[in-house]
Amino acid sequence: MSKVRIIGLMCVASVLTGCMATQPVKWTKTAPMDMKKGGKVAVTASCEMPPSDLTFLQTDLQQKVREVLSGNPDLPDAYKIEVKITKYDKGNAFARFMLIGLGQMYLYGTVEVKQGEPPVVIREGDFQKNYCVGGIAGGMASMQKDVLPTVGKAIADAIKSQQAE
């Protein structure tokens, strides 16, 4: 096999392999939820994180939750969904470009769904979003376009799919 072909195959492999931030929420405690009630979302961080990313998560998650919990989030019986970001690392784009696994992006957090007054936790779990794609795709990836948008969808999907356990 010629050197040109080998280099070409290596380039294709570096673009097409790796892991994306598609990991689901893992519930450690679940209870049935009424999808006709609304849900109010609060997002905080216990680690250093850009305020703009925190604001994006808050807005995106509220929108995704409204697609699943159809009621009014301002009513007293609405669920309270509290998300806390525990690890945030935007990684290094050049390192991701050079080799899969280097320069990874991480976004970890916990989710609590509360109900009632005083609030009682009816569901709790966590999520770990990792992005380690290499090559050109990894070099062009960013926290804002490739990791943050996956959180709201993962939480909404977890709420919807775990309605009756």
Image: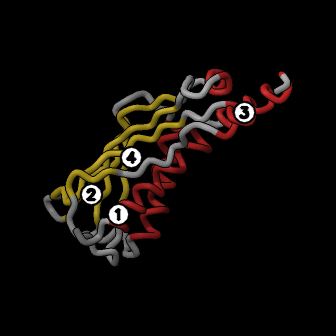
**Disc 2 to disc 3, C-alpha distance:** 38 Å
Of the image marks 2 and 4, the number of the one nearer the N terminus: 4
Of the image marks 2 and 1, the number of the one nearer the N terminus: 2
Give the residue drawn at x 59%, y 41%: 144
Of the image marks 4 and 1, the number of the one nearer the N terminus: 4
Looking at the rendered structure, the kind of residue marked 2 is Val
- Foreground mark, 3 or 1, reads 3
Of the image marks 3 and 4, the number of the one nearer the N terminus: 4
Q: Position of residue 159 (x, y in %)?
A: 35, 63
- Foreground mark, 3 or 4, reads 3
- SS under mark 2: strand
Looking at the rendered structure, the kind of residue marked 4 is Val
- Mark seen at residue 117: none
**Disc 3 to disc 1, C-alpha distance:** 34 Å
For disc 1, the neighbor class at 10 Å (few under 14, some 14 to 19, many from 20) is many
Q: Which residue is mark 4?
A: 43
Circles 3 and 4, Cβ within 8 Å, touching? The answer is no
Q: Which residue is mark 3?
A: 136
Q: Position of residue 133 (x, y in %)?
A: 60, 35
